[in-house]
Every structure is written in C-alpha cells, then in structure tokens.
Image: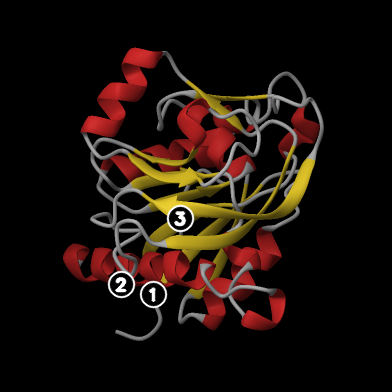
Amino acid sequence: MGRPVVAVVVFPGSNDDRDAAWALGALGADIQFVWHEDDELPETTGAVVLPGGFSYGDYLRCGAIASVAPAMDAVRRFAGSGGPVLGICNGFQILCEARLLPGALRPNRQLEFVCRDTTVRVENADTLFTRRCETGQELLLPVKHGEGAWHADEGQLVQLAARGQIVLRYADDVNGSLGRVAGVVNEAGNVLGLMPHPEHAVDSLLGSADGGLLLAALVDAAAEHVLAAA
C-alpha cells in the first residue's frame, strides 16, 4: 500500500503545519497540504490534521473563522465517513467551533500565554489515537497557548468521562481547563482534539519522544482507513 496520505490543512496564520508534516512524514506518512480555500481533500486521504497556530489571526474567537472555511466542509464529510481527524492546539479550537468536538476553549485561567513542557495522563488507551499507549501512562508534551482552557458544563464532563471521551488529562492545572482536560475525542472515536503539541515531541533530543506514540497511531489509522475504503 505504501505510505498513507495524511492531509494537513493550512489556514492563514497556521504556523505548526510544517512541523506536523515533518513529524508525520518521519513516522511513515505521505503528507499532502490542503489550503483553506480548497473544498476537497486528496482522493486517497487516510487521515486529516488541523495544525496549531493562529488561524485568521485568532479574530472573533480562536478557530471561529477557520471553522467555516471551505476546507472544513471536506473535513466534516471525511469525519462523517469515519476518517480519522486530529486537531492540535488551534486545530482543537477549530474542531470545537465546528461542533465536531464537544466543549469550547477559553482563555487560560492566568490570562497569560503558557509555553512549557507538561505531563499528561492517558485516560483512555482504547482509541485510534492512543492505542500505542496504556491507560494511566504519562506523556511529556509541550504546550503553547493563550486560550487552552477546555470548558463544558459539569454534567457534560461527567457524561464524556463515562463514555471514555476524555482521552488526556493534565497532571497539574496548566491553564484552568475543566477537569484538567487536555484532549477529547468525539463519540464515534475518530476525531481527537488536544492542546499539547505531539509534533514537537517526536525525538528525545527535543526532550521527549512521547508525541510519536500519538502520531504513529494516527498514521496506523490512516493506513487502515485507506484499506477499508479500497
């Protein structure tokens, strides 16, 4: 089958698209960039990544304008067909604004930009994105965001946790996120958003290679999706 195609959607203001492409390419993916004005994904797309950055300058709310870009219609169709979609940082914000994931991302509790390594705990290893991990495993990943506090009502948090949709939690209170939530998956299990940056943690020389576990699982899922569609 060769290397599965992972489409990386690029918006005006994206600044981690090349980083995500490099990391996924190093893990066996064939990267195809998709411009925000494109209304179709490459025909052989096996997975989609919405990268970090400041799409459209973070005007209105972070991710709000990007959520209605033409490319997002294609992402919605792909996700609706069961295709794996990963949103990193700004990508997580976009997925919440697009209602592909529950909740919303709000300004950090301290009202300051946070940029540091942080430890997250794998709450559910039975997902497309965490199956190379074990439940309870701790991953060292960097965060860099100003509006990364995930929020929902308490009842929704309880329901999501009961269904296994809370995938990652911060070990400490990094930004005021409700329940220390760092990553959430949709009910179908094929769309994940997380605030930490796995693409910046794929080599021990960078301080951690733990992000490679998540991205390699995405490449696996991309290959499986292509096979299932063949």
Q: Is residue 41 left or right of residue 185?
A: right
Labels 3 and 2: the sequence-earlier one: 3
Cα distance between the residues tagged 3 and 2: 12 Å
Q: Quadrant of the N terminus?
A: bottom left
Q: Report helix, strand or loop for mark 3.
A: strand
**Are circles 3 and 2 on residues that touch, CB within 8 Å?**
no
Q: Quadrant of the C terminus?
A: bottom left
For badge 3, the amino acid type reads Val
> Quick one: which residue is furthest to the bottom in this view?
2
Q: Which residue is mark 3?
A: 48
Residue 189 pos. (x, y %): 27, 45
Labels 2 and 1: the sequence-earlier one: 1
**Are circles 2 and 1 on residues that touch, CB within 8 Å?**
yes
**Mark number, residue 90:** none
**Mark number, residue 223:** 2
Question: Would you identify the image quadrant in which residue 145 lies?
Answer: top right
For badge 1, the amino acid type reads Pro
Cα distance between the residues tagged 2 and 1: 5 Å
Which residue sits at x=32%, y=14%?
A: 155
Cα distance between the residues tagged 1 and 3: 11 Å
Mark 2, Cα crowd under 10 Å, few <14 / some 14-19 / many 20+, is: many
Which residue sits at x=79%, y=25%?
A: 111
Q: Report helix, strand or loop for mark 2.
A: helix
Look at the image and tell me whether residue 97 can be seen. Answer: no
Labels 1 and 3: the sequence-earlier one: 1
Residue 191 pos. (x, y %): 37, 45
Q: Which residue is mark 1?
A: 4
